[in-house]
Image (cartoon, rainbow, N blue to C red):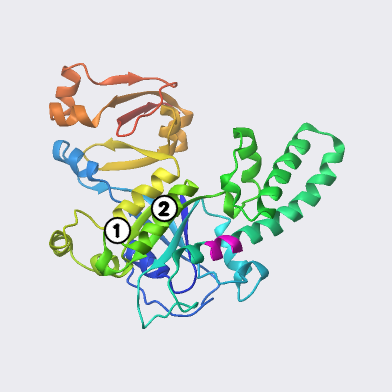
């Protein structure tokens, strides 16, 4: 899975990206500072891994990962090609979901380009750039679809219908994700890479005095996200960058001193998974305990395919037990003795936290 971090210039987007990547890279206060986005493979922290490793002796623990793309600040006029706007917008079309960072912090050394803090204004500014970019894209696709639809083929007519629906929504200045689509519509929609069709997680970048995100500015973003059916997380980018540079013990002490149980970026990573409609299953053995992410509703063979395509192709069955049973019975042997180890076939729908061993033959 891949998520893109977007935002207006000087919102702390790259600070948050560097903290997620634990890269500690410098942050340049410039608009359109580079053409290619920064990319990092980010681990998704999951306390369940450590719980499993308490009962199953293993050499290493491997969290799930996601690919995070830091897309340069998008200023007004990006949709019209100002600066290198079009190049940056093309990068967003390739991701699965969008993390929209919104400035909710004060810093006289990094003045807001508009001279004042107004999260809702900033959200609407960037949203409109994305709407305009999609409108241009849909207009071009619509012309081609109208020509194809002259054949009266069912697929061509369906494509035209979906594009017209999107065009009307964008003409009214609203994102495509607010529309209702059938599964068949969504299959067509995927081909066009519309930015505003992607799910959004609003990330309020807050002051150190508001690390819990209870301040007025963060509250505005939270309410906007709730009203628009999007996700929300409050993060203090400056604090998260400091935490990312610390050793685990020092990080824990710093968090405890602030009354926090974990970095906010852990919450952000998990919320991104939820936003994408993913959940987690585990494999556990002497070499490693590993987390794997799959779409909610995936079957056992599809889960096996997340490990290797051969596992799905040659799937026979899966031996599965729950994390709750592992904690209760303390070992796989005890789980088997209690009759709690299940053998599941091709139609089994995976549950979150399933611990699984796949049997296959290729």
The quarter holding residue 288 reads top left
Q: Residues within 10 Å of mark 2 (few under 14, many from 20)?
A: few
Q: Earlier in the sequence, mark 1 or mark 2?
A: 1
Is residue 246 toward the left or the right of residue 199 in the image?
Answer: left
Above or below: residue 259 compared with residue 59: below
Label 1 sits on a secondary structure element that is loop
Between residue 358 and residue 246, name the one nearer to us. Answer: 246
* Quadrant in the rendering for residue 278: top left
- Relative to the observer, which residue lies in front, 95 or 115? 115
Classed neighbour count for the residue bearing mark 1: other residues with Cα under 10 Å, few (<14), some (14–19), many (≥20): some
Which disc is residue 113 wearing?
A: none
* Disc 2 secondary structure class: helix
Furthest residue toward bottom: 109
- Percent coordinates x, y for residue 17 in the rendering: 39, 65
The residue where tag 1 is placed is 214
Q: Is residue 287 visible?
A: no
- What whole-number distance in Å separates the C-alpha atoms at marks 1 and 2? 12 Å
One can see residue 105 in this view: yes
- Closer to us: 30 or 226: 226
The magenta-colored residue range is 124-129
| Displayed quadrant of residue 88 | bottom right
Percent across and percent down for residue 155 are 75, 35
The residue depicted at 41 percent of the width and 33 percent of the height is 303
* Residue 323: x %, y % from top left: 23, 32
CB under 8 Å between callouts 1 and 2?
no
Q: Which residue is found at the position 61% from the left and 33% from the top?
A: 182
* Image coordinates for residue 227, horizontal then vertical, percent: 47, 48
Tag count: 2
Q: Is residue 238 magenta?
A: no
Q: Residue at x 58, y 49 (%)?
A: 197
Task: Name the quarter where the C terminus is drawn.
Answer: top left
As drawn, the label of residue 223 is: 2
């Amino acid at each position: 899975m891949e998520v893109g971090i977007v935002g207006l210039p000087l919102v702390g987007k790259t600070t948050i990206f560097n903290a997620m990547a634990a890269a500690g890279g410098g942050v340049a206060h410039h608009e359109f500072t580079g053409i290619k986005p920064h990319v990092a493979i980010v681990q998704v922290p999951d306390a369940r891994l450590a719980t499993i490793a308490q009962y199953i002796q293993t050499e290493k623990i491997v969290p799930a990962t996601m690919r995070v793309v830091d897309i340069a600040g998008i200023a007004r006029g990006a949709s019209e090609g100002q600066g290198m706007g079009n190049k940056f917008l093309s990068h967003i079309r390739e991701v699965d979901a969008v993390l929209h960072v919104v400035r909710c912090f004060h810093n006289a050394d990094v003045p807001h380009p508009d001279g004042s803090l107004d999260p809702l204004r900033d959200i609407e500014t960037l949203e409109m750039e994305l709407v305009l970019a999609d409108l241009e894209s849909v207009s071009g696709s619509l012309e081609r679809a109208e020509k194809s639809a002259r054949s009266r083929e069912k697929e061509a007519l369906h494509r035209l219908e979906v594009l017209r629906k999107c065009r009307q929504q964008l003409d009214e200045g609203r994102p495509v994700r607010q529309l209702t689509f059938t599964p068949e519509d969504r299959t067509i929609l995927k081909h066009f890479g519309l930015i505003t069709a992607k799910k959004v997680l609003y990330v309020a970048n807050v002051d150190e005095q508001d690390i819990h995100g209870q301040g007025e500015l963060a509250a505005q973003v939270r309410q906007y996200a709730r009203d628009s059916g999007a996700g929300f997380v409050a993060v203090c980018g400056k604090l998260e960058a400091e935490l990312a540079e610390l050793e685990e013990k020092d990080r824990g002490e710093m968090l405890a001193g602030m009354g926090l149980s974990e970095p906010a970026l852990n919450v952000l990573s998990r919320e991104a998974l939820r936003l994408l409609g993913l959940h987690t299953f585990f494999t556990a053995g002497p070499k490693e305990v590993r987390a794997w992410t799959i779409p909610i509703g995936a079957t056992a063979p599809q889960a096996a395919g997340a490990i290797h395509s051969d596992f799905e192709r040659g799937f026979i069955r899966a031996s599965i037990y729950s994390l709750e049973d592992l904690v209760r019975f303390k070992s796989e042997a005890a789980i088997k003795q209690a009759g709690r180890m299940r053998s599941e076939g091709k139609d089994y729908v995976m549950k979150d936290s399933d611990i699984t061993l796949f049997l296959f033959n290729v």
